[in-house]
Amino acid sequence: MAHQAHAYHMVDPSPWPLTGAIAALLMTSGLAIWFHFHSTVLMTLGLILLLLTMYQWWRDIIREGTFQGHHTPPVQKGLRYGMILFITSEVFFFLGFFWAFYHSSLAPTPELGGCWPPTGITPLDPFEVPLLNTAVLLASGVTVTWAHHSIMEGERKQAIQSLTLTILLGLYFTALQATEYYEAPFTIADGVYGSTFFVATGFHGLHVIIGSTFLAVCLLRQVQYHFTSEHHFGFEAAAWYWHFVDVVWLFLYVSIYWWGS
Amino acid sequence: SPTIFFATPTKLVSESNAPVEYMGANKVPDLQRIFQASEEIPVHLKRGVSDRLLYRTTMALTVGGALYCLVALYIAAQPKNK
């Protein structure tokens, strides 16, 4: 039986890149078919395929790392680089929307009344729910750090409790933001103010949901004894992502909610 | 006559040798054994029936979906008759 003479991971052949690519095809074509022919079948099929791909692909990575021991230090280093690069790409994604916001708000056109917020727009009070949201996310940053230290110190019960608390805070943020969206006196269709507000905060909210889901998967894994005090990169990746989501909110709060009001 | 017990002394958790279970027992060693078994089965099928079922469903949706997509795009590309 051949054994590798290096510490890297040569993965088994996998069907998930193909199914993921087809899912992307189906979702994009499905979007076009929905717009022009009013049928959501293709798009829904694409979404289902995406979920199946994500579930099986990440399940396989957990099998390869936790159960088969393939995540040696060099492999883990590669995974760390990967997560950092991915988060960096997301930073640039948000940078674009901040650029759009500042482009329109630093030099408001005559059509807007030459002022920001534009004439007719009543912005949300930054010291009401948005301030609470800021406190909620900052608190969740503390609880996720508590969870990390608990894992490193082998404190199983505390890790489970602090991780659960982090997820609950994330869900609380999402619920608060949803009510804000419902109650807001302006919509996405209200000129460039509405566009920049809802696209920037909307994508942020999506990332909060993604981050909460990632943390929830980590909670499940922590309960099932996957993490050791020395090796718990999945959790670290989730914590990095969560801190990134928190920082984006701080920029949103200061720029759009506070300066922009 | 033998001593009569009315109650056994309180047993402290710290005195027992069994590890205290909090939210389930550790099944990772068993899973490690399953996944490190030497048969040349790829990791996405290594748990047997449930893996195969999920894989085949996903693949069926992939192939079927791709064909459906091509047909839908072909139809969408037809010029509209006035």
Image: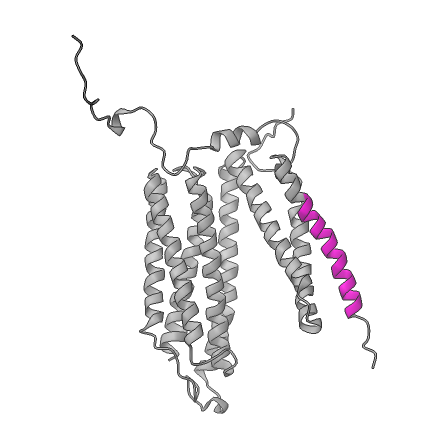
Q: Nearer the viewer, residue A164 or A146?
A: A164
- As drawn, which residue projects farthest toward the top? B1
**Image side of residue A19 versus residue A83, left or right:** right
Q: Position of residue A97 (x, y in %)?
A: 50, 71
**Image side of residue A133 versus residue A22, left or right:** left
Q: Position of residue A1 (x, y in %)?
A: 65, 24
Residue at horizontal 41 percent and vertical 72 percent from the top: A180
Say if A200 sits above or below A8 in the image.
Answer: below
- As drawn, which residue projects farthest toward the right? B81
Part of the protein shown in magenta:
B56-76
Is residue A175 in view from this perspective?
yes
Q: Position of residue B67 (x, y in %)?
A: 77, 57
Say if A251 sits above or below A22 in the image.
Answer: below
| Number of marks in picture | 0
Say if A248 sits above or below A52 in the image.
Answer: below
Residue at horizontal 68 percent and vertical 62 percent from the top: A41
Residue at horizontal 55 percent and vertical 43 percent from the top: A59
Majority SS type along the magenta span: helix
Residue at horizontal 45 percent and vertical 60 percent from the top: A208
Query: How is the rendered protein coloured?
Result: one colour
Say if A24 sits above or below B39 in the image.
Answer: below
Query: Does the magenta run of residues contain A204?
Result: no
Is residue A11 in view from this perspective?
no
Query: Does the magenta run of residues contain B74?
Result: yes
